[in-house]
Image (tube, grey):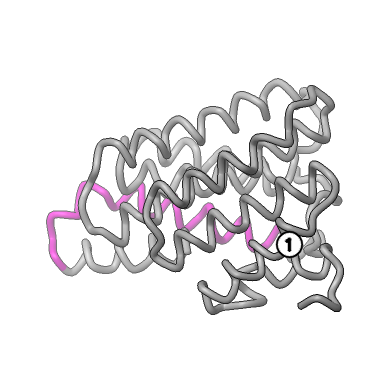
Amino acid sequence: MRSLTVAELLVLTQTNITPDASEGFDIAKAAYERAETPIEKSTAARQAGFRAEQAGETPQVVLDWFENSRTPLSSDEPQIQRELIATELLTGRAMSLRLERMGSKVVELATSADEAFQRGETILQQQHTKGRSWDRFGTMLARHRATHEAMNGKASFGATTAIHGLWRALRAEKEGTSEKHITFVVKQLGMNAAASVLAVSKPLARNSKISSVRHQLALKLLG
């Protein structure tokens, strides 16, 4: 890993590039140690937080890494605040994933997810200009928040959030993440549609078969 740049290491931290969570966690930690700019430092830390969650680390370890991600982002500059959206969406996603893997609702974890998603949404709304394209991180935030609400909160709010996510996907900025625009849009449309299915099917979750299908879909969306 020493021969790789920080940017190359950050690419390797992604779940679709490095499926093994423990390996991804180690790469993220290495990227964090070598990062020089606030955005590099923050990105590496939030990736470490999420890969730590996937690797089964304790909630405190996970949350500590997300706090490390917030620390370098002290400026009010739009680009810095944009990175905070990404940190908050991954924090909420990680806590939601833990809840789903545990198979039971823990109030503290659910609250942590709720608060993280809301912080990210608040920043997004402050930065968004009516009539303009939606930030890609904000588009992803909607889909994960919708999934969380469908499984751990209010189904109606989950459905509404998923609808917002569908709109944001259609109006997503063409830049902001590494994915090609059409690939990003199609992926987000599909994910938000799936989240809406989770929300609509919540009243049927008492049926064990439906509950199992919802659980597996939620794991896929969050993981």
98 or 149: nearer the eye? 98
In the picture, measured across the screen, residue 179 lies left or right of residue 164, that is right
157 or 12: nearer the eye? 12
Q: Secondary structure at mark 1?
A: helix
73 or 83: nearer the eye? 73
Of helix, strand and loop, which mostly describes the magenta segment? helix
Q: Residues within 10 Å of mark 1 (few under 14, many from 20)?
A: many
Q: Mark 1 = which residue?
A: 31
Residue 101, horizontal then vertical, whole percent: 31, 62
Name the image quarter holding the N terminus.
Answer: bottom right
Residue 177, horizontal then vertical, whole percent: 78, 55
Q: Which residues are magenta?
A: 184-208
Residue 26, horizontal then vertical, whole percent: 60, 70
Q: Image height check: is 49 above or below 26?
A: above
Q: Residue at x 64, y 62 (%)?
A: 29
Q: Image height check: is 96 above or below 16?
A: above
Task: Verify whether residue 123 appears in magenta.
Answer: no
Residue 16 placement: quadrant? bottom right
